Amino acid sequence: MMTTPGGSGRFKPLPTAMYAGYSGTASSWVAKTSVSASGKRIQREMAELNVDPPPECSAGPKGDNLYHWIATIIGPSGTPYEGGIFFLDMIFPSDYPFKPPKVVFKTRIYHCNVDTAGNLSVEILRDSWSPALTITKVLQAIRSIFLKPETYNPALPVIARLYLSDREKHEEVAKEWTLRFAK
């Protein structure tokens, strides 16, 4: 038990919480079990996601890193992405939920809102971000661009133009990419 000098020259015990995680060196006063506010928020959202995941979506930490997740989205029926399995990296900033997670497609996809490096360009992760949003809402928003691309906010304008001018050709190329990279 850790103690501190008392007024009478005797030592009084310190409360256990004050030295939780102390291992004897000055630099180890950080409690081993402490989780930041952002970490607690991520843990709460992970629990909610496990209880009620969005359709055709899953996500969770990569290993034991609470701030780096792997997500999967199954391409929705009736789209050129149907049946494809798309993997995404989600990196949460230390000031989450005040800043959005960075989401990157690891599976190649032919989509106007995803650039060639897999970076995602959607309003919810930029100008429309709010701390009230959750991981579940982010996954739902990403899944929604499979159904209705944000052509006004493209990462690849050439794909957005094809989508708007020749939907049949766009669907053909997107299906081909899904078969090639996501199945």
Image: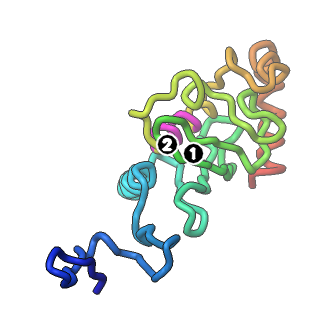
- Which residue does the image show at 60% across and 41% down from the upper left? 77
Span colored in magenta: 136-142
Measured from the top left, where is residue 28 in percent x and y? 49, 73
Please give left or right for residue 25 compared with residue 179 in the image: left
The secondary structure that dominates the magenta segment is helix
Within-10-Å neighbours for mark 2: few <14, some 14–19, many 20+: some
Picture quarter with the C terminus:
bottom right
Type of amino acid at the residue the image marks with label 1: Pro
Disc 1 to disc 2: CB gap under 8 Å: yes
Q: Disc number at residue 81? A: none
Measured from the top left, where is residue 65 in percent x and y? 57, 63
Identify the residue at the far left of this view: 8
* Mark 2 lies on residue: 96
Viewer-side residue, 85 vs 135 = 135
Type of amino acid at the residue the image marks with label 2: Tyr
Please give left or right for residue 33 compared with residue 175 in the image: left
Please give left or right for residue 49 compared with residue 11 in the image: right
* Mark 1 lies on residue: 93
- Which residue does the image show at 74% across and 34% down from the upper left? 114
Measured from the top left, where is residue 179 in percent x and y? 79, 48
Quadrant position of residue 44: bottom left
Q: Secondary structure at mark 1?
A: loop
Measured from the top left, where is residue 76 in percent x and y? 59, 41
Question: Quick check: is 138 in the magenta stretch?
Answer: yes
Viewer-side residue, 150 vs 16 = 16
- Which residue does the image show at 49% across and 42% down from the upper left? 96
Label 1 and label 2: CA atoms lie apart by 5 Å
